[in-house]
Image (spheres, rainbow, N blue to C red):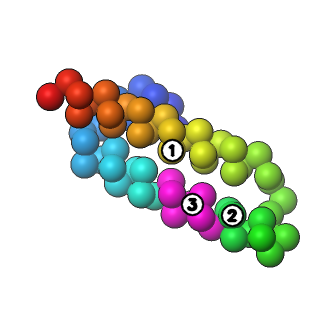
Amino acid sequence: MKAADLRNKDVAGIEAEIKDLQKAHFGLRMQKGTQQLNNTAALRQTRRDIARAKTILAEKQAAK
């Protein structure tokens, strides 16, 4: 997810996106634990997407 896409969303939309990303990350961690994960780079990417979304959420909340 691009930062520009997140900046266009409202606070509720960003929170929903964070929740979805966390669920996806949990699923990837479970796949890794059961040795079913082929693309290990997906873990890093989802972790960074979560951090990006949380940063933009904090910026929007601080602006209010």
Assess disc 2: are there few (<14), some (14-19) or many (≥20) residues with their C-alpha within 10 Å of its C-alpha: some
For residue 8, which numbered disc appears in the image?
none
Task: Decide if residue 5 is in sight here.
Answer: no
Report x, y in % for residue 37. Answer: 80, 63
Report x, y in % for residue 7. Answer: 34, 29
Q: Earlier in the sequence, mark 3 or mark 1?
A: 3
Cβ atoms at labels 3 and 1 below 8 Å apart: no
Task: Decide if residue 42 is in sight here.
Answer: yes
Instruction: Report, in whole angstroms, how far the alpha carbon at label 3 lies from the one at label 1.
Output: 10 Å
Instruction: Report, in whole angstroms, how far the alpha carbon at label 2 lies from the one at label 3.
Output: 9 Å
In the image: residue 4, left or right of residue 63: right
Instruction: Report, in whole angstroms, how far the alpha carbon at label 1 lies from the one at label 2.
Output: 14 Å
- State yes or no: residue 14 in magenta: no
Give the position of the C terminus as an image quadrant: top left
What amino acid is found at the position of numbered circle 1 in the picture? Answer: Ile
For residue 29, which numbered disc appears in the image?
2
> Which residue is drawn at the image coordinates 69% and 44% (left, top)?
44
Q: Earlier in the sequence, mark 1 or mark 2?
A: 2
Q: Look at the picture and state if 60 lies above or below 10.
A: above
In the image: residue 1, left or right of residue 37: left
Q: Look at the picture and state if 20 lies above or below 14.
A: below
Q: Look at the picture and state if 31 lies above or below 15.
A: below
What amino acid is found at the position of numbered circle 3 in the picture? Answer: Ala
> Which residue is drawn at the image coordinates 42% and 57% (left, top)?
19
Q: Which residue is mark 3?
A: 24
Which residue is the extreme one toward the bottom? 34
Q: Earlier in the sequence, mark 2 or mark 3?
A: 3
Q: Which residues are magenta?
A: 21-27
Element marked by disc 2? helix
> Which residue is drawn at the image coordinates 34% and 44% (left, top)?
14
In the image: residue 26, left or right of residue 10: right
Element marked by disc 1? helix
